[in-house]
Image (spheres, grey):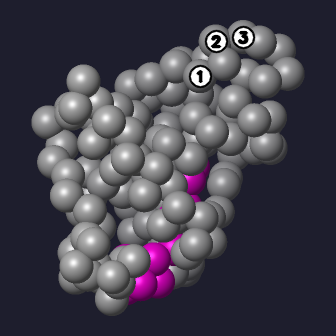
Amino acid sequence: MPAEHALRYSFDQDMFENFTATDRWTKKQVHCVYQSMIVAIATRHADAVDIKFLVDGRKVWVALPHPAWVEYKKRTRRSITDPLALEIAGHYLKTALESGEGIGREMYSLTVEETLAHLEAVVAEMQAEAHV
């Protein structure tokens, strides 16, 4: 996205720090809680940021690739902050659970384009809520 069309947002509330999703296959509500964020190069030698959630008490990791930070900065001149990374990962996790993608997986690894698509979706949701 061109810099002149950069998205404006603020994080007055965390949408995906503590949320529920409906499992597509079982129709059961699952409770998701953010636990931690680590730079994966230190733990698994990956060029990513790993964000850990508990999904009904089970550990689930969402890996966001570092090149997404670079690409977003190049496109918008803005940075992906830690709170924004949490929102991107939570949005992805909720989408994955509700679409039935990879139920039972412990690790989800996003591509740069997937990361940026979820970033745009998070910002659009925030902007919509701000206008309500």
State the mark number for residue 28.
Answer: 3
Label 1: element kind:
strand
State the mark number for residue 21.
Answer: 1
Q: Where residue 59 sits: x, y (%)?
A: 59, 37
Q: Which residue is located at x 25 percent, y 70 percent?
A: 6
Farthest-out residue, right: 25
Q: Which residue is located at x 58 percent, y 72 percent?
A: 113
- Residue 87 sits above or below residue 31 on the image: below
Q: Where residue 42 sits: x, y (%)?
A: 43, 75
Check residue 40 for magenta coloring.
no
- Residue 90 sits above or below residue 114 on the image: above
User: Does the rendering let one see residue 17?
Assistant: no
Mark 3 to mark 1 CA distance (whole Å)? 8 Å
State the mark number for residue 29.
Answer: 2
Label 2: element kind:
strand
Q: Residues within 10 Å of mark 1 (few under 14, many from 20)?
A: some
Check residue 66 for magenta coloring.
yes
Mark 3 to mark 2 CA distance (whole Å)? 4 Å
Q: Which residue is located at x 68 percent, y 41 percent?
A: 96
